[in-house]
Amino acid sequence: MAIRLRTKKLIKANLVGAGIMLVISGAGGFFLYDHYSDNAIQMKREYKSSKLNSVANQSQRAYALTEDIKKGEKITPDMVEEVFLPDAAAATNRLQVDDVDTTKYFAKTDLKKHTVISDAVLYQDEAINNDERKAEYSFIELPTKLEKDQYVDIRIQFPSGEDYVVLSKKKVTDLSGVTMWTTVDEGEILTMSSAVVDAYVQKGAKIYAIQYVDEHMQENSQMTYPVKNNVKQLIKESPNVVNIAELNLEQQNRNRLDDALSKLSEEDRQAMDAGQKDTDTKISEENEKRSTQERLDALATESSQQDAQDAVVSGGN
């Protein structure tokens, strides 16, 4: 009997202990859950606050493309949309709002939709100066694959080996055979005149054009040709020259060129002249062959078209 009573008391004590432990564990779990719940709520609040601040900081206005653009294509207002960027992502040379409406911009390279446009990927029509004129040149040696609207440097090569940039990054506005048209200002006209005199006086000298690989991505060359001293003085005194700074007159060393040319022997000049004439003859012969072949191909095409028309007419009868 006593054993049973002790057993019951022991069971009751165990049950009470287990109950107390359960209460303690439940209270601890509640407080732990409440602690982590508060932390989670705080983290959510901080995240929302950070996100709101990030959106609020996107206050820099810019333009982004609404469609893919090809190289050389004009950017019009309907191709762009206004976007907002954070300070860290806003390039200083981005297009400002309303620029697209007032300036003609063109793509330097192929651009994808959503690209934020800036000066780095666009170029614009240059303002026309009062002294600019359309010039026609037929004495410049042109690249055989030169096409209209491409850009070239006009250079002069002397028999002594000197080679200079006469005109820099000129757009070929039109082209016909050996004749090209471009726009030049007063300073460039006088510079070109000096180069022409040099080319005629110095046997073996030549004026030629060389194309840009990518005219929109490449910067223009510096004009390095030292004009004749009397022409330099004329440029400085001319009231019609607008962009005199671009001619680099103060950096030109005409005396060095004249000295090099004066030391060139007559034998060297004759050899250069003979070599140039031989080259010119080969180029002329090649051009004549090409022209003859093109005429034959055109006649063959015309004949084939006529035969096809005759066959259609005969079939119809």
Image (cartoon, rainbow, N blue to C red):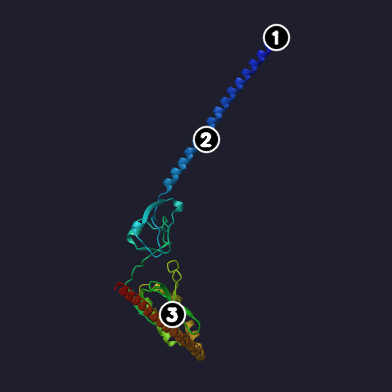
Q: Nearer the viewer, residue 18 or 310?
A: 310
Helix, strand or loop at label 3? It is strand
The nearer-to-camera label among 1 and 2 is 1
Q: What residue do we see at 32% from left, 74% from top?
A: 309
Q: Are marks 1 and 2 in contact (CB under 8 Å)?
A: no
The nearer-to-camera label among 3 and 1 is 1
The answer for how far apart the CA atoms under marks 1 and 2 are is: 55 Å
| Residue 240 x, y percent position in the rendering | 33, 76
Q: What residue do we see at 70% from left, 11% from top?
A: 3
- Is there any visible trace of residue 204 in the rendered image? no
**Picture disc at residue 175:** none
Is 3 positioned to the left or the right of 30 in the image?
Answer: right
Report crowding for label 2: few under 14, some 14 to 19, many 20 or more residues within 10 A (C-alpha): few
**Picture disc at residue 2:** 1
| Residue 114 x, y percent position in the rendering | 41, 55
| Residue 74 x, y percent position in the rendering | 36, 63
Task: Name the residue type under label 2.
Answer: Asn
Q: Choose top left, top right, bottom left or bottom right for residue 310.
A: bottom left
Say whether disc 1 or disc 2 marks the residue closer to the N-terminus.
1
Report crowding for label 3: few under 14, some 14 to 19, many 20 or more residues within 10 A (C-alpha): some
Count every numbered label the image shows and give the total: 3
Helix, strand or loop at label 1? It is helix
Q: Which residue is mark 3?
A: 208
Q: Nearer the viewer, residue 42 or 285?
A: 285
Q: Which residue is mark 2?
A: 39
| Residue 146 x, y percent position in the rendering | 41, 75
The answer for how far apart the CA atoms under marks 3 and 2 are is: 76 Å
Say whether disc 3 or disc 2 marks the residue closer to the N-terminus.
2
Q: Choose top left, top right, bottom left or bottom right for residue 25.
A: top right
Q: Nearer the viewer, residue 49 or 309?
A: 309
